[in-house]
Amino acid sequence: MEASQLDDFFRHLGLSILKRRRELGMSQGDLAKSAGIHRTYVSDVENGKRNFSIGTLYAIAHSLKLPVQKLIDLGDADVKLPPPRE
């Protein structure tokens, strides 16, 4: 996967997190507290500025009451990935 594709993925994933957070009526502070991360970290995630760990993704997804896979699928929907290598 090229760096630009990974950047696109994190940007789209961040927008999915932002959308879901707003659907739940949560502030960035609410999400941060629930996920055990700092509010500015949430901001960076939502703006696609963080390449974060699977543990952080799990904590965010759990706080947003979504399975991790659903959150990934939402973020992955608009990202064009190359076909898998054979």
Image (cartoon, rainbow, N blue to C red):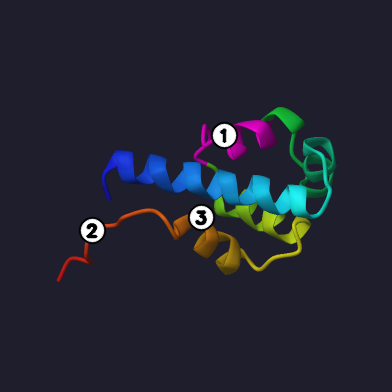
Q: Amino acid at mark 1?
A: Asn
Residue 78 image point, x, y percent: 41, 55
As drawn, the residue found furthest toward the left would be 86
| Residue bearing mark 2 | 82
Which residue is under mark 3? 75
- Rendering coords of residue 3 (x, y %): 31, 39
Measure the C-alpha gap from mark 3 to mark 1. Answer: 12 Å
SS at badge 1: loop
Magenta-colored stretch includes residue 48: yes
Give the structural element (helix, strand or loop) at label 3.
helix
Could you tell whether 23 is left or right of 48 in the image?
right
Residue at coordinates 74% horizontally, 49% vertically from top-left? Answer: 21
Is 10 left, or right, of 83 in this rendering?
right
The crowding category of the residue bearing disc 1, from other C-alpha atoms within 10 Å (few below 14, some 14 to 19, many at least 20), is: some
| Real-space Cα separation, disc 3 to disc 2, in angstroms | 16 Å
Three-letter amino acid code at disc 3? Gly
Q: Amino acid at mark 2?
A: Pro
Locate the C terminus and report the quarter of the image it occupies. bottom left
Circle nearer the N terminus (2, 1):
1
**Residue placed at 59% from the left, 51% from the top?**
16
Q: Earlier in the sequence, mark 3 or mark 1?
A: 1
